[in-house]
Amino acid sequence: MIAPQASATVGGTPLVWLARIGDGLDAQICGKLEYFNPGGSVKDRIGAAMVGAAEARGELVRGESVIIEPTSGNTG
C-alpha cells in the first residue's frame, strides 16, 4: 500500500500472537503493534481523532489554521 499522506496510515495496526506468553493458559494472547503508526505510538490515534473532530466542528480549517503542540509526551 502506498498512502497519500502519513495521516492515512494511523490505525489499522497489526495483531500478533504471543504464543510463549500464552503457553499453558486456557487463552490465546495477542499484542497490538501500535508502533506501526506513523509516530510510533498509540497516541497517533487520539491525535488524529482530535484534529478530525476540530475540523468537523469548523474550529480547525485545513490550510488556514495552525496547531501548536506544547507538551512533551502526555498528549496535552
Image: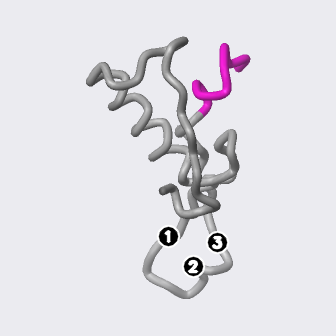
Above or below, 56 against 17 in this view is above
Mark 2 / mark 1, whichever is N-terminal: 2
Q: Position of residue 69 (x, y in %)?
A: 57, 46
Mark 1 / mark 3, whichever is N-terminal: 3
Quadrant for the N terminus, please.
Answer: top right
Q: Position of residue 8 (x, y in %)?
A: 58, 25
Tell whether position 33 is magenta: no
- Amino acid on which the number 2 mark rests in the picture: Gly
Question: Which residue position is annotated with label 2?
Answer: 22
> Residue 28, which numbered label?
1
Q: Residue at x 68, y 45 (%)?
A: 39
- Residue 60 occupies which quadrant of the picture? top left
Q: Position of residue 42 (x, y in %)?
A: 55, 54
- Residue 57 occupies which quadrant of the picture? top left
Callout 2–callout 1 Cβ contact below 8 Å: yes
Provide the secondary structure element on which disc 2 rests: helix
| Disc 3 residue crowd, few under 14, some 14–19, many 20+, Cα 10 Å | few
Above or below, 62 against 13 in this view is above
Q: What's the distance in space between the residues labelled 3 and 2, CA to CA?
A: 5 Å
Callout 3–callout 2 Cβ contact below 8 Å: yes
Q: How many numbered callouts?
A: 3
| Disc 2 residue crowd, few under 14, some 14–19, many 20+, Cα 10 Å | few
Q: Which residues are magenta?
A: 1-9
Q: Residue at x 59, y 44 (%)?
A: 13
